[in-house]
Amino acid sequence: MRCAAGPLREIEIGGAEELDAALRGATEPFVVRGLVADWPLVEAGRHSGKAARDYLLRFRRDVPFTVSVGEPSGDGRLFYDHTMGMNFRTARAKLEDVFARIDAEADNPEASPLYLASIDMHQFFAGLHEANQVDLGERSVLASIWMGTRTRIAAHNDFPQNLACVAAGRRRFTLFPPDQFRNLYLGPIDNTPAGRAISMVDFHHPDLDQHPRFAEAMRHALVAELEAGDAIHIPPMWWHHVEGLAPFNVLVNYWWRETPRWMGQPQEALNHAIMTIRDLPAHEKQHWRDVFDYYVFNNGDQTVGHIPEEGRSVLAPLTPESAGRIRAFLLRQLSR
């Protein structure tokens, strides 16, 4: 089933200030064609995948990289196997050895997909980021590079903001609003291919008997195919299914938070709630739902108005110090 998805919104950007304005407070995804078309890496990739690999090797550090090796003739889908283990294995190898294998198997349709995911550009390369980067102003960003052959990465979401730039090859992005998680049939949250829960639906061959609500998700889907030089902004919690369509694909992405890092990750609270609340009797769960509404989701004057400001402790707006007290308390409790 090829989705009846709508196109992603495309905007034009005239420079760093316009990009900053478009990103600031954006809650909907958008595509910018040609945002990084002037990168030397993009130019190398336009010649060939081999030229892109040769360019990358000029900057790599002499350290082992982690590479995922998928199943031969597996349609590039990095997913679960029939036992809910992973259908790929990970190995450590020098980048030149990984690329040599890609070169050797370039004409082999049965070759195993190879995927180097979320590689820190500063840690694993020297000078690559400086030669190929987007000006994101004062944002504190994590710059990562993703390299590999034809792959399919199941729909998942991320907590930070994401600006993803296609540096070589082509990629297809299929996006869903955050509220579509119920219709994507998510897998386990602790046993995942890459740390985030993923959709169990095979987007190339969806089984609507097994996953009937996926048809509703597709009515909300947005899709875009990006060429080398194009970029996409994916706001927090938007679900995205990503396909590398060329024999060799490179993506550079930037993650950043609009909130301070000391606030922690909401996923941690979900994991703790599953351990402590989910299996309580129904009437106790309802009580804790009300308590969370009172203190977390609807917190306001009714929560703290009766407490002197100097005595509100962690009920006051959080600071790095009060967040640290909460973290220390949780660590003590969890280590008992």
Image (tube, rainbow, N blue to C red):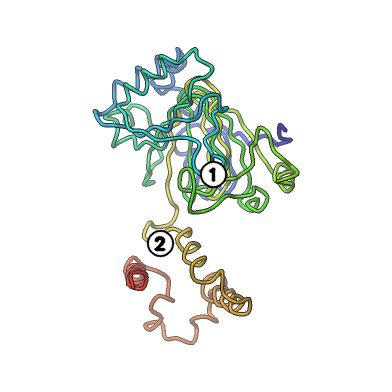
Task: Point out residue 129 in the picture as x, y percentages from the top left corner.
Answer: 33, 31
Task: Point out residue 296 in the picture as x, y percentages from the top left corner.
Answer: 52, 71
**Badge 1 density bin: few <14, some 14–19, many ≥20, Cα 10 Å:** few
Closest to the camera, between mark 1 and mark 2, is 1
Q: Looking at the image, is 130 positioned above or below residue 176?
A: above
Query: Nearest the camera: 310 or 151?
Result: 151
Instruction: Give SS at disc 2.
Output: helix
Q: Which mark is residue 214?
A: none
Q: Earlier in the sequence, mark 1 or mark 2?
A: 1
- Disc 2 target residue: 263
Identify the image quadrant of the N terminus.
Answer: top right
In the image, what residue occupies the spot 39% across and 46% down? 139
In the image, what residue occupies the spot 50% across and 83% down? 305
Instruction: Give SS at disc 1.
Output: loop
In the image, what residue occupies the spot 46% across and 49% down? 160
In the image, what residue occupies the spot 60% across and 77% down? 281
Query: Nearest the camera: 42 or 278?
Result: 278
Q: Looking at the image, is 38 positioned above or below residue 322?
A: above
Q: Looking at the image, is 218 positioned above or below residue 33?
A: below
Task: Point out residue 282 in the picture as x, y percentages from the top left corner.
Answer: 63, 76
Q: Which mark is residue 83?
A: 1
Choose top left, top right, bottom left or bottom right for residue 118. Answer: top left
CB contact under 8 Å: marks 1 and 2: no
Q: Is residue 18 visible?
A: no
Task: Point out residue 178 in the picture as x, y percentages from the top left corner.
Answer: 61, 51
**Badge 2 density bin: few <14, some 14–19, many ≥20, Cα 10 Å:** some
- Give the number of marks: 2
Three-letter code, disc 1? Thr
Outermost residue, front direction? 83
